[in-house]
Image (cartoon, rainbow, N blue to C red):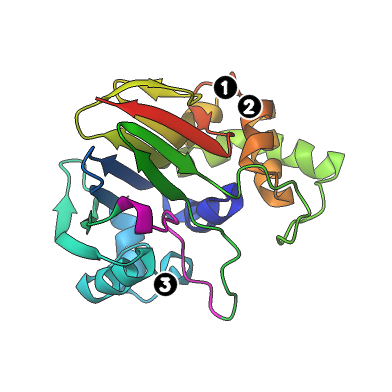
Amino acid sequence: MKISTLLLAALACMLASCIEIKSTVIVSKDGTATIEESVLMSAQLAAMMQGGQGDQLKGLVMDKAKAEERAKKLGEGVTVKSHEEVKTPDGKSGVKVVFAVADLSKLKYVPFEPEQEGKPSTTQPMTFALSGSTLSITNPDADKKKGGGGEAKPKKSPDEMAMMKSQMAMMKPMFAGMRVAVAVKGANGISSSNATHLNDGTISYMDIQFDKIMDNADVFAGFMESADVGLSPEEVAEKFKNVDGLQIEGKKVVTAELK
């Protein structure tokens, strides 16, 4: 699970106002699981999509056919449990898809990977193993260093960084409500874990709340540059470990005791 891959879709639509992308893998002690994936968009962005724009978001907003295709990619025995169109009181709309996983050990999970025509994915899937009540989650991309085969870009020059910071006031409304979150939780809770971020039985692998991190211009500019140059989750987690609104799991293997 690469930071830059997940940010691609969110950053591509920042000028069209907010998008909220959430993924939760819910694991049961019997070795089954469900995956809940939801994408909510502002009215402006939804209108753009209906008008044929927003190609970068292909694959994120799934119709039933795309959901079935994604189930096959997630591994043997994964099926679509439900597909629901969602609308919220504040005007957002989108889709929530729930996948049923018959055998957790066969799940190969890449959260919300947008379609990139002509560009095969380089993201390695997260895998899961269950021994008794002990869950192990492996993210092969966690400790991959920058420059390890990805499409890393050169670092921004001091002038480019200064320009980004100077534009913060103008940019902030564009990011209002924008969030990308990936989590793993136990169906009946988690009693203990070596995860960096564990709260109320939920392990946060990624939770990026853009409007919060934009409160600090230096942090936001540094984070955006980190995504550009292709830092690994391990590197990003260490660099921004105390930033409000930003949670990244940097461990390659996370273990948890399921209740």
Counting residues from the start of the chain, the first of labels 3 and 2 encountered is 3
Q: Which residue is mark 1?
A: 243
Name the residue located 24 percent from the left edge and 76 percent from the top edge.
65
Type of amino acid under label 1: Val
Label 3 to label 2: alpha-carbon separation: 33 Å
| Mark 2 neighbour density, 10 Å: few (under 14) some (14–19) many (20 or more) | some
Counting from the top left corner in percent of width and height, residue 55 is at 46, 72
Is any atom of residue 39 visible in this view?
A: no
Q: Is residue 216 above or below residue 221?
A: above
Q: Nearer the viewer, residue 145 or 15?
A: 145
| Mark 3 neighbour density, 10 Å: few (under 14) some (14–19) many (20 or more) | some
Type of amino acid under label 3: Gln
Label 1 to label 2: alpha-carbon separation: 6 Å
Most extreme residue toward the right, as rendered?
A: 158
Disc number placed over residue 193 in the picture, else none: none
Q: Which residue is mark 2?
A: 240
Q: Are marks 1 and 2 in contact (CB under 8 Å)?
A: yes
Q: Nearer the viewer, residue 94 or 78?
A: 78
Q: Secondary structure at mark 2?
A: loop
Q: Are marks 3 and 1 in contact (CB under 8 Å)?
A: no
Q: Secondary structure at mark 1?
A: loop
Residue 109 among those drawn in magenta: yes
